[in-house]
């Protein structure tokens, strides 16, 4: 039986990762497989540069969409696969090996999973995680400084010139096409309860 495929998008800092972490904490790996588009970034030397020579990682062309689709196809067929974790251009980090095992529910997470038509057409339930711009930039600053050690000037430059323009062009338009909008200005707790109930019901019905 084909897995239920759920796609989760949203702007940088909207809370996609936090929502998925909650799902992972509630369900086992045998029930859910999460595939993040972040692990399909192209190498830095293949990234487009803006007029100031700064790499732009917030374009659809920043990702290996064919590799993402091919891996998804294997998971749909019930196969397992491994892939190196993306280390966000940290030369001191050694990537971990990620193992994806097919499961009754596949969750796809990333900026542009709806932008690629053949991926979008595979998705059964589309979710958009939304937050006000002021909250997203604060979360982005905290994440990039604490987790990735990026300078504040770099974070703000990329947000202004890369993140926001590409969100407006490639991500925000899909908010009117999704099945569920999760507002995460403060908390997504109530929306998560609805989603959790849906997933539990799906797994119970599938087991019958």
Image: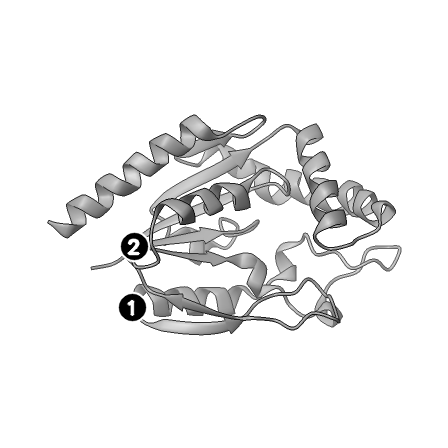
Q: Could one spot residue 112 in this view of the protein?
A: yes
- Residue at x 50%, y 55% (from the top left corner): 116
> Do the residues bearing badges 2 and 1 touch, measured as CB atoms within 8 Å?
no
State the SS at label 2: loop
Callout 2: 10 Å neighbours few (<14), some, many (20+)? some
Q: Which of 33 and 66 is in front in this view?
A: 33
> Which of the two discs, 2 and 1, sits closer to the camera?
2
Q: In this view, does 25 lie to the left or right of 166?
A: left
Q: Which mark is residue 31?
A: 2
State the SS at label 1: loop
Residue 156 placed where, x, y %? 81, 42
Q: Which mark is residue 77?
A: 1
Residue 174 placed where, x, y %? 51, 38
Specify the quadrant of the image occupied by residue 199.
top left
Q: In this view, does 2 lie to the left or right of 97?
A: left
Instruction: State whether residue 48 is above or below residue 110.
Output: below
Residue 132 placed where, x, y %? 64, 28
The colour scheme of the drawn protein is: one colour
Mark 2–mark 1 distance (CA, rounded to whole Å): 15 Å
- Residue at x 75%, y 62% (from the top left corner): 48
């Amino acid at each position: 039986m084909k897995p239920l495929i759920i796609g989760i998008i949203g702007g940088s800092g909207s809370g996609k990762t936090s929502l998925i972490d909650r799902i992972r904490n509630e369900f086992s790996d045998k029930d859910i497989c999460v595939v993040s588009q972040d692990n399909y970034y192209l190498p830095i030397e293949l990234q487009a540069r803006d007029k100031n020579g700064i790499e732009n990682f917030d374009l659809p062309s920043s990702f290996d969409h064919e590799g993402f689709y091919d891996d998804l196809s294997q998971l749909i067929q019930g196969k397992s696969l491994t892939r190196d974790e993306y280390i966000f251009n940290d030369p001191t980090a050694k990537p971990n090996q990620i193992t994806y095992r097919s499961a009754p529910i596949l969750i796809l997470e990333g900026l542009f999973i709806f932008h690629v038509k053949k991926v979008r057409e595979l998705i059964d339930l589309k979710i958009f995680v939304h937050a006000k711009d002021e909250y997203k930039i604060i979360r982005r600053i905290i994440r990039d400084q604490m987790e990735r050690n990026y300078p504040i000037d770099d974070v703000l430059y990329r947000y202004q010139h890369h993140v926001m323009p590409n969100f407006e062009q490639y991500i925000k338009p899909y908010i009117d096409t999704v099945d569920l909008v999760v507002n995460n200005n403060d908390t997504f707790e109530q929306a998560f309860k609805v989603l959790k109930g849906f997933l539990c019901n799906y797994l119970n019905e599938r087991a019958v």
